[in-house]
Image (cartoon, grey):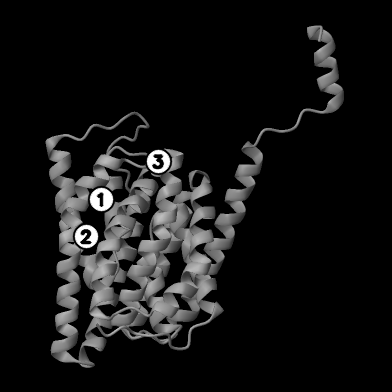
Amino acid sequence: MDIVYPRRVDWKLSIAGLFVGVLVGMTGMGGGSLMTPMLVFLFGFKPTVAIGTDILHGAIFKSFGAARHRQLGTVHARLTLWMLLGSAPFSLLGVALSTWLKHRYGDGFEDAAAVILGVALIAGGLGFAVKTFLTGRAKSDAPFLLSARDKQIAVLTGVVGGFIVGLTSVGSGTFFGLVMLLVFPLTAAKVVGTDIFHAAALLWVAGAGHLAAGNVNLGATGWLLIGSIPGVLVGSQISINLPERALRLALATTLTLSGLKLTDIPRAEIVILVVIAIATVTLLTVGVRKLLRSSPKPVPAAAEAGTNRISGR
């Protein structure tokens, strides 16, 4: 097994992990779509190594977010299992194809992988844009019982999305989140929670495959986790209070620019980094303000004393 060891990795990766962790915790989406291109054109990783490192990193930090969303009651466990039935085996097929192409075509495949990744990112950005203006089935917080048709759609979604994730690391949030929003009557909070819960399980399967194939930089994974684990926990806590439409438009722009960069559009990385930073800071600020407004206000001592006198205490 040819493990890729650390190369020029430091605290800057932790900052990148923090940004992505917060966004994933709040939206359930954008992990591989944002982190993989950052590793490629901000930190100089080869596309195959960036994909493998991001998938293993995503498996670990999304597990923390998944546990938190499960505690908050925003996970549809049965839907997750049916999607995983299709996504887990086909993610390994995607990893196998990626590895075979790498060995078959050598360094030339790195350029091809960058183009594949770029096209997937552009598709992801367009998916986010569509998601912003479409609502799908009527949403309800009532228990959702899966019909036979719902189960078939979930498995087919897993097959297509799992293969894309294994091949490119993109889609664990974008593709599955889009389908859940349009097809199933889940609230936004449950789409986010179910998305993260499924992604965590799926990425463990794909991450193990990339680790065995030698496509993982273990040092970079550690630095990313230092930032992404606290980021995803904070983001999960305030996910219910998001300005969702503005967020999706910002992410759609970011993902599309990421794809254009990987297909050789010049100087897109500067805009991408600025958009990610602005979106993260803005959403954190709005989310924290809403949390503070919704928290119970302390009762003044004088008012409490008056209440006690009235009640005879």
Residue 74 image label: 3
- Taking 312 as reference, is 272 above or below it? below
- Taking 147 as reference, is 232 above or below it? below
Q: Residue 189 occupies which quadrant of the picture?
A: top left
Quarter of the rendering occupied by the C terminus: top right
Tag 2 and tag 1, C-beta contact below 8 Å: yes
Q: Secondary structure at mark 1?
A: helix
Q: Which residue is mark 1?
A: 179
Label 2, label 1: how many angstroms apart (C-alpha)? 10 Å
In the image, what residue occupies the spot 42% across and 48% down?
Answer: 67
Q: How dense is the environment of label 1, judged by Cα within 10 Å: few (below 14), some, or many (20 and up)?
A: some
**In the rendered view, does 68 fall on the left or right side of 141?**
right
Residue type indicated by callout 3: Thr
Is any part of residue 119 visible from this angle? Answer: no
Label 3, label 2: how many angstroms apart (C-alpha)? 21 Å
| Whole-percent x, y for residue 65 in the image | 44, 53
